[in-house]
Amino acid sequence: MLRNALEPWHLLVLVAVVVLLFGSRKLPDMARGLGKSMRILKAETAAMREEEKPAADAAAAGAAPAAAAPVAGAAAGGTAAGGTAAGGTVAGGPGEPVRRQP
């Protein structure tokens, strides 16, 4: 049914519609915003993976996992795991309020 669903001419029509809807002036701004969002997402997923590694290693060793500390990515413009887009970080863990940093 969907064997040849996305052919090259479909992409050309899609690009033409996007240019007509948004105009050529707004496309660079939209691409810049999308790139920034993707960098933030990548940094946050990397921070979450690093946060899970010590907890998984401690669980494998039989020790209780330590309390979560603020993530370094929050200082670089991202958000902490469970934080806010405004730069807030989680103080200790679930159930504790989110503190916003200036």
Image (cartoon, helix red, strand yellow):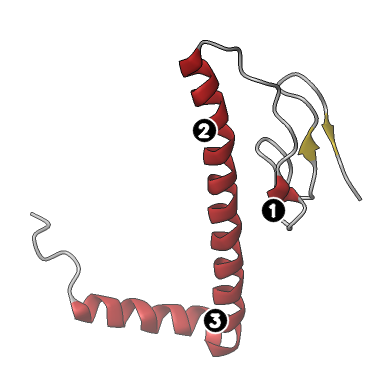
The residue identified by callout 1 is: 78
For the point 8% across and 54% down, which residue is it?
1
Taking depth in this image into account, of 54 and 34 the one nearest to the observer is 54
> For the residue carrying disc 1, how many other residues have a C-alpha within 10 Å: few (<14), some (14-19), or many (20+)?
many
The residues tagged by marks 3 and 2 sit, at their Cα atoms, a distance apart of 39 Å
The residue identified by callout 2 is: 53
The correct choice, above or below, for 50 with respect to 87 in the image is above
Q: Nearer the viewer, mark 1 or mark 2?
A: 2
The residue identified by callout 3 is: 27
For the point 50% across and 25% down, which residue is it?
57
In the structure shown, which secondary structural element does the residue marked by tag 1 occupy? loop
In the structure shown, which secondary structural element does the residue marked by tag 2 occupy? helix
Residue 101 x/y as whole percent: 88, 45
**Labelled pair 3, 1 in contact (Cβ < 8 Å):** no
In the structure shown, which secondary structural element does the residue marked by tag 3 occupy? helix
Give the residue type at disc 3: Leu
Taking depth in this image into account, of 96 and 18 the one nearest to the observer is 96
Residue 35 x/y as whole percent: 55, 69
Residue 62 x/y as whole percent: 51, 10
